[in-house]
Image (cartoon, helix red, strand yellow):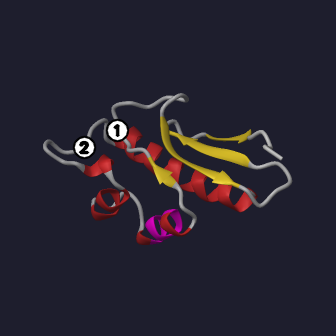
């Protein structure tokens, strides 16, 4: 689980760094709508995209003009622990773990 939190933090940090340098995508660009578009724009690496696919991390989109601790960029559910949890990456670069209630 710590590896997943760390990897998501690394990706969110890349996005935040881009937002700090560029307050918007180039005019007419659809860069923030998919992981592939962020890779094509050189914002994320191919390894980042592969990691997100392999670990089934849901990408919600990214807009460098909207940065905040309440704007979700990606999330996943981690079930390999006693208490399942949801890991959420925000546009401000933060990553938070939330415990999920067991249904058993």
Please tell me whether mark 1 or mark 2 is closer to you in this view: 1
Q: Is residue 79 above or below residue 75?
A: below
10 Å crowding of disc 1: few (<14), some (14-19), many (20+)? some
Relative to 84, is 32 on the left or the right? left
10 Å crowding of disc 2: few (<14), some (14-19), many (20+)? some
Q: How far apart are marks 1 and 2 (CA)?
A: 8 Å
The location of residue 55, given as percent across then percent down, is: 58, 65
The location of residue 23, given as percent across then percent down, is: 31, 35
| Residue span colored magenta | 47-52
Mark earlier in primary sequence (1, 2): 2
Relative to 18, is 91 on the left or the right? right
Relative depth, front residue between 15 and 34:
34
The reply to whether callout 1 and callout 2 are in contact (CB within 8 Å) is yes
Q: Residue furthest left?
A: 28
Tag count: 2
Residue linked to disc 1: 63
The location of residue 3, given as percent across then percent down, is: 70, 62
Q: Is residue 20 above or below residue 42?
A: above
The location of residue 5, given as percent across then percent down, is: 67, 53
Question: Within the magenta stretch, is there residue 50?
Answer: yes
Question: Within the magenta stretch, is there residue 39?
Answer: no
* Quarter of the figure that contains the N terminus: bottom right
Relative depth, front residue between 19 and 84:
84
Q: Residue at x 81, y 57 (%)?
A: 81
Relative to 45, is 7 on the left or the right? right
Which secondary structure type mostly characterizes the magenta part of the structure?
A: helix
Q: Quadrant of residue 27?
A: top left
Q: Which residue is drawn at 37% across and 58% down?
A: 35
Residue linked to disc 2: 25
Q: Which residue is drawn at 80% across and 44% down?
A: 102
Q: Residue at x 50, y 37 (%)?
A: 72
Q: What element carries label 2?
A: loop
């Amino acid at each position: 689980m710590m590896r997943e939190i760390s990897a998501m933090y690394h990706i969110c940090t890349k996005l935040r760094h881009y937002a700090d340098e560029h307050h918007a995508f180039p005019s007419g660009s659809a860069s923030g709508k998919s992981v592939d578009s962020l890779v094509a724009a050189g914002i994320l690496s191919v390894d980042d995209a592969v990691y997100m696919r392999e670990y089934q991390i849901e990408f919600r989109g990214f807009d460098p003009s909207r940065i905040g601790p309440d704007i979700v960029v990606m999330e996943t559910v981690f079930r390999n622990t006693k208490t399942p949890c949801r890991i959420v990456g925000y546009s401000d670069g933060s990553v938070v773990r939330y415990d999920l209630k067991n249904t058993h």
